[in-house]
Amino acid sequence: MKLSTLLPFALAAATSAQTTSSYTDPKSSITFQAFTDPTSGYTFGLALPMTPTTDFIGILVGKGSGWVGASLGGSMVNKLLIAAWPNGNQLVSSFRKATSYANPPEATGAFSMTPIAKGTYINSTHFSYTFLCKACILADGTTFTANATSGVLGWALSTAAPSTKSSHSSALNRHSAQGNFGVQLSAAMSNNYDQWAAMAAAPSPSARAFTA
């Protein structure tokens, strides 16, 4: 199915009104610069070390059985995308990259996501995926840059589950909502980053399909 507007084409005029703010997750005690969509409850946030290089800590929050996603470069095409969704009592995550406005295939590379258990769960109202994203800040224009003080990211969600929920390479249904938001990268930096990053589980072959 064509996803012509899965993630925003470019910086929208309303982006200036949609920006991140400080949010401390009560489960993990990690402080993020986070954007929350007031209609859907979608949230994406990130935390950075004081001198960012290639890694960050992220949080994705959604409701229901559908997927939630973020573009680390704002638009959809030729940007590194992240998606996550529930599969029973598990959460499944995936990297994506699209060369056109169509269903984004899974992306492979040196980047990886490792869940942080204290901030990863599914309950009766929502699901939360907190993760250490290693080698995820790239210098090829597909993500925000490590030395920037601010940036523009994209968000999207679907209320419909992926076609094969158990597979991290599953086709994604067309989004139900999407947009852009500004992120204050300098405000995402914290002296506590190393302590938070140490909470990530050791990488394993099942890191993208794990019990919450």
Image: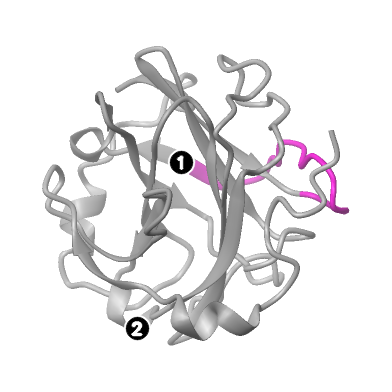
Q: Reading the chain from its start, which is encountered first: label 2 or label 1?
A: 1
Residue under the image location 39 percent in, 18 percent down: 90
Which quadrant is home to the C terminus? top left
Above-or-below relation of 79 to 114: below
How busy is the neighbourhood of tag 1: few (under 14 within 10 Å), some, or many (20 plus)?
Answer: many
Residue 37 vs residue 83, the one in the foreground: 37
Residue under the image location 73 percent in, 59 percent down: 76
Disc 1 marks a residue whose amino acid type is Met
Residue under the image location 73 percent in, 48 percent down: 97
**Residue that label 2 marks:** 186
Which quadrant is home to the N terminus? top right
**Residue that label 1 marks:** 113
Magenta residues: mostly which secondary structure? loop
Above-or-below relation of 17 to 64: below
| Residue 104 is one of the magenta-drawn residues | yes
Q: Quadrant of residue 145?
A: bottom right
Q: Residue 197 at what x, y percent from top left?
A: 26, 51
Q: Residue 77 at what x, y percent from top left?
A: 79, 59
How busy is the neighbourhood of tag 2: few (under 14 within 10 Å), some, or many (20 plus)?
Answer: many
Q: In the orientation shown, which residue stands out farthest toward the front?
A: 39
Q: Residue 99 at what x, y percent from top left?
A: 86, 53
Q: Quadrant of residue 175?
A: top right
Q: Secondary structure at mark 2?
A: helix
Disc 2 marks a residue whose amino acid type is Ser
Q: Which residues are magenta?
A: 98-112
**Are the two marked residues, 2 and 1, in contact with CB atoms closer than 8 angstroms?**
no
